[in-house]
Image (spheres, rainbow, N blue to C red):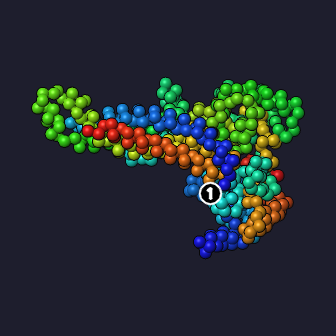
Amino acid sequence: MDIDLIINSFPKLLTASLITLKLLLVSLIIGVFLGLFFAILRMSKNIFVKQFAYGYSYIFRGTPLLVQIFIIYFGLAQLEWLKKSVLWVILKDPYWCAIIAFSLNSGAYTSEILRSAFQTIHTSMIEAGKSLGISNKIIFYKIQIPIAIRQSLPAYGNEMILMMKGTSLASTVTLMDITGVAQKIISTTFKPIEVFIIAGSIYLFMTFCINKFIKLLEKKYNF
Amino acid sequence: MTVLASLLIAGNINADQIKIGTEGAYPPWNSKDAAGNLIGFEVDLANELCAIMKRECTIVEQDWDGMIPALVGRKFDAIMAGMSITDERKQTITFSQGYADEVASFAVVKGSSLEGMDTPEGINLSLGGSAVTKSLKTLTKALEGKTVCTQTGTIHQNFLDSGDVGKINLQTYKTQDEVNLDLTAGRCDVALAAAVAFTDYAAKSGTSVVLVGPTLSGGAFGNGVGVGIRQAGDDEVGKRDAQLLKDFNKAIDKARKQGIIRELAIKHFGFDASM
């Protein structure tokens, strides 16, 4: 065990964790909006809208995240017309390719979590609202959404942790996140154990923080 | 536990059997055909060397970034993966004499502003002196602010990291295939690798990737490509490793004398890269 290497690589990996955090936060935020949007579409009475939302979640939950990143990063770069369009400004950048892949993936899982949360809301609560003469819109915003969020918190905590670990795949498209920097250090020191133990510890600490955060939210929304 | 350990070592230590690790993603040195079989200069050469040593060899595939750890971890006994002999690597493993050498070069997609880069034809970093310094200065100016792509953990990355070419936006990839893809996709302004890695790619893919600037050798680029072998230890495996190194050196001598290396180099590279 090379203690010097552990001490030397720790600050480098810590700096790299900022990129990991950035990727995680941006993807989760976009993912929540996508998830809410598609969860609402799933509850639509229009069969096409419903099937479209189902197809989205089916495709992104049914394929590996790595494949999704590769299709977006390497795959789309092969389309000549795309490279000539304005979209290329975004797709040229590995950072945005990773964000797009992570957000779409997280959105698919979040939509499922929220959908099942909406479905567990007992009709009696909605009927109670209606009997008090509250409008459908307000019932949705003031009754359904808060309950759904509370119901989905434990499952969503899991999704946050999965996504956090998923960000390590950003290193496959040249981004220097924790895993990317770890691999770079290993490529010159040839000592994987030391470096990956540190990288793993940082990931573990992030998981710890996410867990605490979710617990806090659960307490706050306990009703 | 001891039984298990001895079993593991015993499985590895069959004296006549050698496992050789290669990447399979760095044509024409080593790559895979459509059926997934390992092919290339080093695969052919490994078979020739094993025939000379009268040993049974199996060639196994290993990702580039785990190549040296896998050798040290006894996943295989030797590396033949276009790996240049460098001082940095010698701190961890040892090398046979070099069997082939060829220069590194920059490459761009045709039409790039870097295409007419006005630099001398070749820079040998080992020579040093004012001529090399001046050439590097021209190169530094041409590459300023450019996105330069290369494979992780290679001599090419070492060179770009060394500061010899000033401040560039360095982007690294797990395989050369990915470097080639992103060069043609337009994400890289310019890429650095073995010159043949680009000419081979251009020929096979039909893309308009062209070499630019000087060819680079010496210094950070090491002293040719050799067989990587574990540093000999005191135990059984260590003694066997020491013998393996001797055997490889002898076999390379013989293959060189018989013109086998030269022949294979011309077949795969199109020129004599043997040394």
Name the foreground residue: A5 vs A29.
Answer: A5
Return the x and y of residue B42 as percentages of the image width and height: 71, 56
Left/right placement of residue A36 relative to residue A78 reads left
Return the x and y of residue A54 as percentages of the image width and height: 31, 41
Left/right placement of residue A218 relative to residue B170 reads left
Return the x and y of residue B85 as percentages of the image width and height: 77, 50
Query: What residue appears at the point 60 percent right and 41 percent down from the top-left corner?
Result: A13
Q: In the rendered view, tell whether residue B9 sits above or below residue A110.
A: below
User: Could you tell me if residue B81 is visible in this image?
Assistant: yes
Q: Quadrant of residue B179?
A: top right
Name the foreground residue: B267 vs A105.
Answer: A105
Judged from the image, the secondary structure of the residue bearing numbered disc 1 is: strand
Query: What residue appears at the point 87 percent right and 31 percent down from the top-left corner?
Result: B131
Q: Which residue is mark 1?
A: B61
Chain ID of residue with mark 1: B
Return the x and y of residue B214 as percentages of the image width and height: 77, 34
Name the foreground residue: A86 vs B158.
Answer: B158
Query: What residue appears at the point 45 percent right and 33 percent down from the top-left corner?
Result: A26
